[in-house]
Image (cartoon, coloured by chain):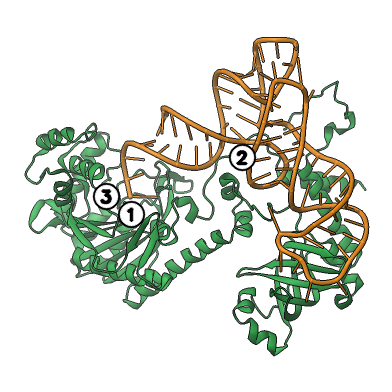
Chain colours: A green, B orange
Amino acid sequence: MRERKQNEKDNKPEASEQIQIPLAQLIKTRREKVRELRGRQVNPYPYRFELTHHLGEILADFDQLEKGDEPVRVAGRIMLKRKMGKVFFADLLDATERIQVYVRKDEVGPGLFDVFDILDLGDIIGCEGKLMVTKTGERTIRVSSFEVLTKSLHPLPDKHSGLTDKEMRYRRRYADLIVNPEVRETFVKRARIIQTIRDFLNEKGFLEVETPILQPLYGGGMAQPFKTHHEKLDIPMYLRIADELYLKRLIVGGYDKVWEFCKDFRNEGLDRLHYPEFSMIELYWAFADYRDIARLLEELLRHTVFTLHERYKVTYDEHEIDFEPPFKWVTMLGSIKEQTGVDFTELDYRQAMVQADKLGVETEDLLNRGKVIEAVWEAKVEATLIQPTFVADFPVEISPLAKKHREDDRLTERFELFIAGQEVANAFSELNDPMDQLERFLQQGKALQAGDKEAQPLDDDFITALAYGMPPTGGLGIGVDRVVMLLTNQHSIRDVIFFPQMKEMKEGTIPVSQILNQILEEEKGE
RNA sequence: GGGGGUGUAGCUCAGUGGUAGAGCAUCUGCCUUUUAAGCAGGUUGUCGAUGGUUCGAUCCCAUCCACCCUCACCA
């Protein structure tokens, strides 16, 4: 596979078959230690270890535990190691915290002491010992005995500067997590946010459900889908772009409050706010309208922010975002008028195009009045919305699943919530008139034919469901990744997703498995 | 897709038209309360890939690859 040029002038003629990079040497040295441990009857990969505390619990309750004089049993990864003759100091890192351990030859015995000497940064050990405080005041576990729990073969990033290369941090998130505590913290917060929302909705009587990810027909949003194929059924299938149409079927079925935590997929561009696989929370609430949904969403966010930060203000970028309800409520047309002085309310398609043009908005490919208004709004208003703001009453053409506005049938009862210039949620009074819904689908069909790749196909079964009768319903979709970004002060969606998709590694990188395989071959040859 | 940037040791980074350097890590010593421990000594590189220019390229040029930022479309 890898070709290697034979150079006649190479003064290391024997070396051509060998991987000569220093990483291979480092790994070989570590592998030798595995063999040495085994020689000393120490299993480098044992099965379990009984612990009494997380390191975080020890630090939180140190004084009490120190007085108690009971030994603690902890496990963690060696992050730092300092030898001082017949004594070691090492830093141990577990899922919660980092703490210093102190190993004395006269306490663990010469045999174990030598084992500790062999250990590398990155190795995982279990320790038993009592607590102490050093001269300089550092809280420390004085180790009476320890066990090797896992020998690490690959060296850790630099003990001080850590791992900063973004590419490596994404490709090897595990290494990022080991050395960057703030990354661990971000993902803990992500989990807490989702848990808080789940508890909140459960408390409010919403039923958590699961609907198909793999669908014969996509719908519920404006986006291009991922397309795949089911071999046995021999039919095309799509990864869902939204859950909407299935959740509404459940409302038809008689549930009155349902929600789903969903991964959705959209085959579109990637940037700091968009990622092809993203998380949403969708909920549907029968007998409610979009105003009710707005109040629910305010409460949900207020509660989530407070649970996480114990206050309602969150720092994001240079902004202080205030999540104390009520959030500002503006209409799309009203906010455009406020920002540009132009009132689009009574303008038809052609007039709107003219005005958009005057405002310097790119109007190519804008196929209808609604798209023009949306484009103007995005260009002129969106970025200005820093504090939580509901933007309401979207044009009907761009809202094919939302009910027409009770006071203006060119609009729909729909809002999106904007925070820090980013959309974080989208909600409607759901369209439940099957005739109207059918007409909207037909219009979307025309748009599809006219080249709008995001227009939605007709879903006959969904129309059928509506024909059975769906009660008046309010629906909501929350962009989970964006909420997490806002509440953790992260600026790229990749920083709140554990394993962002990457293309194949750059050329010239030797796979670790190849190095290990070479060692394996060598060991077999012995 | 357009524009800008980056790619050198396991990690963090310097650097040069004459085949490369620091700190950390690693290896060998010394050291029983250290703090990125210290001290002494040693090892370590397809300078992202492929072509071109050149007596000679890691450096200049071209193409490609990966990643980041940004603009356009979508959450």
Query: Residue at 58% of width from left, 50% of height from top?
Result: A169
Mark 2 element type: loop
Query: Marks 1 and 3, Cα distance to the nearest angstrom?
Result: 8 Å
The image quadrant where one finds the N terminus of chain A is top right
Name the mark on residue A420. 1
Q: Position of residue A140 (x, y in %)?
A: 71, 75
Q: Which amino acid, by three-letter code, is at mark 1?
A: Ala
Badge 1 local density, few (<14 within 10 Å), some, or many (20+)? many
Q: Count how many numbered circles sit on residues in the image.
A: 3
- Left-right relation of A211 to A94: left
Name the mark on residue A384. 3
Badge 2 local density, few (<14 within 10 Å), some, or many (20+)? few
Among the two numbered marks 1 and 3 on one chain, the one whose residue lies closer to the N terminus: 3
Query: Residue at 19% of width from left, 39% of height from top?
Result: A372
Can residue A337 be seen from the camera position used here?
yes
Using the image, name the chain to which the residue with label 2 belongs: A
- Left-right relation of A384 to B52: left
Can residue A430 be seen from the camera position used here?
no
